Amino acid sequence: MQKKTSFLVLVLVLAALIGGAYVLYGRLSAGAGADNLSVQTPPPAQTPGETGAPQDSAAPEETEPPKVEAPDFTVVDADGTEVKLSDYVGKPIVLNFWASWCSPCKSEMPEFNAAWEELEGEVQFLMVNMTDGARETVESAREYVEGEGFTFPVLFDTKSEAAIAYSAYSLPTTYFIDAEGYVTARAVGAIDGETLQKGLDLIHPQA
């Protein structure tokens, strides 16, 4: 009976994570642009005199779309200590999902590392490795990062909790999260320095 209860709880937790990821994916997909950056933005406000805009003061106010709160997750850091995304809220966050066997992931790594070194202390970069224990291990990921001389923080998603929470089934995938913990933009696929800067401008205008 206890095993059945534990299994049911696990199924419900996974369902909640998948449901949250689906909502997150749907809300951000609508703003996808040619540079593969999907942005969560409010609709442009109309002013009196524009086509379709009422001329009197009783015109309804434009309302912003609801903010999308970044789903929390638990992964491990380089020391094997469990950490949560929520531990880093308070500063803007660049959340990147990657693997050392992924060529597109590796193509964007130098841009991420350069941005991290420039903005360390202002913007938090969390490079979440898809550590499945077979195709990718903690050891193989560390070997790649150290071999390239990257200094950004690497986290290891050994239980796929972060991947499920963010629907990170295509690598690389990057999320831009503001200092309050709300998702501002998402990019699926490798991004260049210009697109990375666009994402940074959304969460940290001074960058």
Image (cartoon, helix red, strand yellow):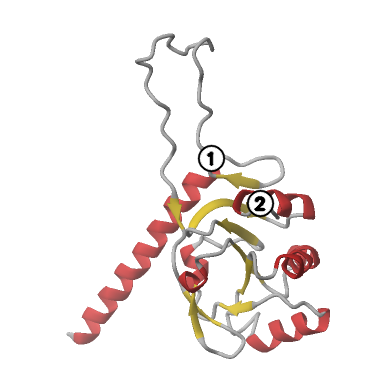
Q: Residue at x 70, y 55 (%)?
A: 207
Q: Secondary structure at mark 1?
A: loop
Between the C-alphas of marks 1 and 2, the distance is 12 Å
Query: To which quarter of the image does residue 132 belong?
Result: bottom right
In the foreground, 27 or 149: 149
The image's mark for residue 41 is 1
State the residue at coordinates (46%, 64%): 165
Nearer the observer, 152 or 61: 61
Q: How many marks?
A: 2
The residue lying toward the viewer, choosing from 75 and 94, is 94
Q: Pinpoint residue 200: horizontal percent, then vertical percent.
A: 67, 54
Residue 199, numbered circle: 2
- Residue 133 % position (x, y): 59, 84
For the residue marked with disc 1, what is the amino acid? Thr
- In screen coordinates, is 158 left or right of 194? left
Residue 21 placed where, x, y %?
A: 45, 58
Image side of residue 54 versus residue 133, left or right: left
Q: Residue at x 72, y 54 (%)?
A: 196
Secondary structure of the residue carrying tag 2 is helix
What's under tag 2, amino acid-wise? Answer: Gly
Rendered view: 140 above or below 110: below
Specify the farthest residue to the left.
1
The answer to whether residue 4 is left or right of residue 107 is left
Residue sitting at x 58%, y 44%: 39
- Graded by Cα atoms within 10 Å as few (under 14), some (14 to 19) or many (20 or more), the crowding at tag 2 reads many
Q: Quadrant of residue 176?
A: bottom right
Q: Considering only vertical position in the picture, is 129 above or below 203? A: below
Mark 1 vs mark 2: which is more N-terminal?
A: 1
